[in-house]
């Protein structure tokens, strides 16, 4: 029992103890100097059955971490994870207590650029937990920290995968062509800060936004390349983003899941706007927070009705079913916490 191997992984320590022939073991968690003892389950000791167990120390208290295989939670930022600082801090504590020690992976999928995310993270502080993976620019860039606490480094494999069927000049020409054919009352240009190698964006009046999206895709196709256009936003003018066909929030989610070898059944996606629908549809469990924009609420209501109808049919056939789409009552990060509770993951 005295043998132990310690491994630092994303700031957490794990210890493996030989348990052959041992039914139960007790141990004590202390700080490096042995001055503080954490966890007083039995006289200051924690009891461990002859099985895998993970505990975490948060705020001087010991908690049992999530059981089962690791969870991948992918969340949009603005209006979903961000917007309520107190709820954001509560989510951070929940994640650090329950999921990070058990190998859980937290990822953010946002329309922001890396620089815009870093500015937001500095502004929000403890209310925005640092992720294990960052997906930016509407699913066109993937980043991971360079070591624990290190700067975010771009995933070149993902970027190279997109370059195979994408030509930035053709996308820019398509954008200019469509804008020239439309009046200023229908489309508006966006600055360079909203453009990137794999994303060309403009604002379109809501009632013509889908037509503009279709025109952009057709203009790229006429130049011999494939693309997709994503419409998002809530107002008189909305965003239209032109992306490589293989990009987007769903494709990038699947890429991150594969990189971390997460079981597909252990993926939870959370969002609040129309450009989150493909990401939510691709996840085993999807969460529309209570403050979601009308476009996402309409999609979620229809998808949930279809899912409930299918669940009823399966129940009649004697098959077990599990709710996979949750429309939370609570807003923003509080809505994520509510959904995790419904999924028995809180």
Image: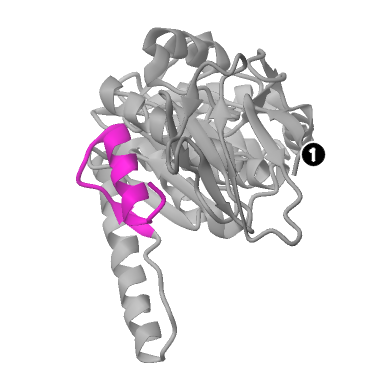
Residue 65 vertical position relative to residue 235 in the rendered view, above or below: below
In the image, is 250 to the left or to the right of 126? Answer: right
In the image, is 251 to the left or to the right of 211? Answer: right
Residue 196 visible to the viewer: yes
In the image, is 175 to the left or to the right of 254? Answer: left
The residue depicted at 21 percent of the width and 41 percent of the height is 330
Residue 204 vertical position relative to residue 113 in the rendered view, above or below: below
Q: Give the image location of residue 272, x and y in percent.
A: 33, 38
* Residue 126 on the magenta span: no
Q: Secondary structure at mark 1?
A: loop
Of 63 and 269, nearer the camera is 63
Crowding near the residue tagged with mark 1, few <14, some 14–19, many ≥20 C-alpha atoms within 10 Å: few
The residue depicted at 47 percent of the width and 35 percent of the height is 44
Q: Give the image location of residue 50, x and y in percent.
A: 64, 58
The residue depicted at 53 percent of the width and 16 percent of the height is 35
Of 188 and 160, nearer the camera is 160
The stretch in magenta equals: 325-346
Give the position of the N terminus as an image quadrant. Answer: top right
Q: Give the quarter of the image for residue 28.
A: top right
What sort of colour scheme is used for the picture?
A: one colour
Of 23 and 331, nearer the camera is 23
The residue depicted at 32 percent of the width and 81 percent of the height is 312
* Residue 329 on the magenta span: yes
The residue to which callout 1 is attached is 3
Task: Specify the farthest residue to the front.
Answer: 43
Q: Give the image location of residue 92, x and y in percent.
A: 41, 28
Residue 23 vertical position relative to residue 106 in the rendered view, above or below: below
Q: Give the quarter of the image for residue 197.
A: top right
């Amino acid at each position: 029992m005295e043998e132990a191997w310690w491994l630092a992984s994303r700031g957490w320590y794990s210890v493996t103890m030989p348990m052959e022939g041992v039914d139960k073991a007790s141990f004590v968690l202390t700080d490096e100097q042995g001055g503080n003892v954490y966890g007083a389950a039995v006289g200051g000791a924690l009891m461990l059955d002859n099985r895998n167990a993970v505990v975490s120390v948060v705020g001087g208290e010991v908690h049992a971490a999530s059981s089962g295989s690791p969870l991948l939670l992918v969340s949009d930022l603005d209006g979903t994870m961000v917007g309520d600082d107190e709820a954001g801090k509560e989510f951070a504590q929940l994640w650090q207590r329950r999921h990070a020690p058990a190998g859980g992976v937290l990822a953010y999928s946002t329309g922001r650029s890396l620089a815009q995310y870093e500015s937001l993270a500095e502004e929000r502080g403890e209310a925005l937990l640092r992720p294990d993976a960052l997906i930016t620019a509407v699913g066109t860039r993937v980043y991971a920290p360079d070591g624990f606490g290190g700067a975010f480094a771009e995933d070149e494999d993902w970027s190279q995968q997109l370059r195979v069927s994408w030509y930035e000049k053709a996308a820019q020409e398509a954008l200019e062509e469509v804008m020239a054919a439309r009046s200023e009352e229908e489309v508006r240009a966006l600055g360079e800060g909203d453009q990137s190698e794999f994303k060309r964006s403009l604002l379109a009046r809501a009632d013509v936004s889908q037509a503009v999206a279709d025109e952009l895709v057709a203009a790229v196709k006429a130049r011999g390349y494939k693309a997709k256009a994503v419409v998002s936003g809530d107002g008189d003018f909305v965003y239209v983003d032109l992306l490589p066909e293989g990009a987007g929030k769903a494709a990038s989610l699947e890429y991150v899941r594969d990189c971390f070898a997460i079981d597909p059944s252990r993926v939870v996606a959370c969002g609040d706007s129309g450009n989150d629908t493909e990401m939510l549809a691709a996840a085993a469990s999807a969460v529309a927070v209570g403050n979601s924009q009308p476009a996402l609420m309409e999609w979620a209501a229809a998808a949930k009705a279809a899912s409930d109808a299918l669940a009823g049919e399966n129940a009649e056939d004697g098959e077990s079913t599990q709710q996979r789409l949750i429309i939370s009552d609570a807003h923003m990060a509080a809505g994520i916490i509510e959904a995790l509770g419904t999924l028995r993951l809180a």
